[in-house]
Image: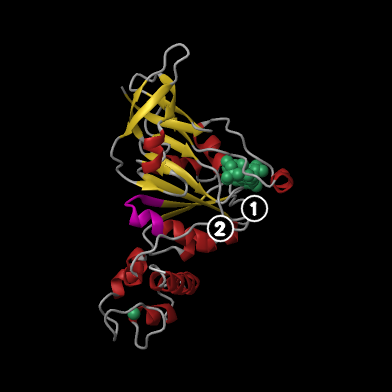
């Protein structure tokens, strides 16, 4: 039989077949060695019967996947970054954008809790102008732009991802009238844990599916040739080929068209500054890749 993984907790997976029937399954060790099943995976399985466990036999080829959050076969990743507390970690947003682009997943930026700090929300969205990402300031509490975001996401398989406490589960509840568990910041600090502990795929009555995922604060950027790093920054594209040095990293080279565009206010300086930092990290990792 075939189905889609909706959730995986403690070695047990829930799969749903085309008829909407749900099965509890385990994954064989030989399968887990190659790759652990991810939420969103299409799998072949043998259902359990009586006392017998059901087993996932194979993971069908993935259209795409992310490592963090660990999800597969999605159309879009909605990066949720808060305008209030916890303060948005923009280097983390940048890393998620790079990961999405490298994996061929369309990113959307949702600046959450916008009713708390409207100016901060607008400033964050402004930094990503030209980055070919829809940046929408939303509030799960007031409903601001929730309808616009839902219209943008309609019919697609989309995962909400980002820092713990950014408001992913709250936003999903506001978007789709659900009742996922959400957590107070104060409780969170006491417990030091995510409110959402495992990823979950939810089929939507209007079509498409939404994935709630646990928050994270660290994301290792995949190591690849640093000369390709700029390709994940669409706002540099119009200036490509116009630099004095070729290839140009657009970092500290003289007569760099991208740096001139930053100086002229055409590219956001904060976003470019973070690019330079992530790039130097990538160059070090690339040099040390065989150590
Ligand atoms: N003021 C305000 N608070 C919000 C908004 N959305 C969420 N919150 C609050 O932010 C806190 C965290 O929300 P969650 O939805 O649990 O955050 P999460 O991103 O799912 O967190 P994890 O599951 O731990 O990754 C809760 O106290 C929410 O009430 C909003 O639009 N405005
Ligand atoms: Mg959550
Ligand atoms: Zn350059």
Residue 257: where, in percent of width, then height? Answer: 33, 81
Neighbor class of circle 1 (other Cα within 10 Å; few <14, some 14-19, many 20+) is some
Q: Is residue 104 magenta?
A: yes
Quadrant into which the N terminus falls: top left
User: Would you say residue 173 is visible in this rendering?
Assistant: yes
Q: Residue at x 57, y 58 (%)?
A: 88
Residue that badge 1 annotates = 116
In the picture, the disc for residue 8 is none
Q: Give above or below for 127 relative to 185.
A: below
Relative to residue 185, is residue 31 drawn left or right? left
Which element carries disc 2, helix, strand or loop? helix
Residue 192: where, in percent of width, then height? Answer: 68, 47
Q: Give above or below for 130 relative to 140.
A: below
Which element carries disc 1, helix, strand or loop? loop
Quadrant into which the C terminus falls: bottom left
Q: Is residue 223 magenta?
A: no
């Amino acid at each position: 039989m075939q189905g889609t993984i909706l959730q995986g907790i403690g070695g047990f997976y829930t799969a749903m077949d085309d008829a909407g029937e749900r099965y509890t399954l385990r994954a064989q060790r030989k399968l887990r060695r190659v790759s652990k099943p991810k939420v969103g995976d299409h799998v072949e399985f043998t259902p359990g019967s009586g006392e017998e466990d059901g087993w996932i036999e194979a993971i069908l080829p993935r259209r795409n996947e992310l490592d963090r959050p660990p999800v597969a076969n999605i159309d879009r990743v909605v990066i949720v970054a808060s305008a209030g507390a916890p303060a948005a970690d923009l280097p983390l947003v940048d890393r998620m954008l790079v990961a999405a682009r490298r994996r061929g997943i369309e990113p959307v930026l949702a600046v959450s809790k916008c009713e708390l700090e409207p100016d901060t929300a607008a400033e964050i969205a402004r930094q990503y102008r030209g980055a070919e990402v829809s940046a929408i300031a939303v509030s799960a509490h007031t409903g601001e732009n929730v309808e616009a975001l839902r219209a943008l996401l309609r019919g697609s398989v989309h995962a909400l991802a980002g820092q713990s406490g950014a408001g992913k589960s709250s936003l999903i509840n506001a978007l789709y009238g659900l009742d996922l568990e959400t957590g107070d910041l104060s409780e969170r600090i006491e417990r030091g844990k995510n409110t959402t502990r495992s990823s979950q795929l939810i089929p939507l009555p209007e079509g498409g599916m939404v994935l709630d995922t646990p928050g994270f604060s660290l994301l290792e950027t995949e190591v690849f040739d640093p000369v390709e790093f700029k390709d994940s920054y669409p706002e540099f594209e119009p200036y490509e080929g116009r630099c004095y040095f070729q290839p140009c990293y657009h970092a500290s080279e003289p007569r760099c068209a991208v740096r001139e565009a930053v100086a002229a206010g055409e590219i956001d300086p904060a976003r470019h500054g973070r690019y330079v930092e992530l790039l130097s990290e990538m160059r070090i990792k690339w040099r040390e890749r065989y150590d």
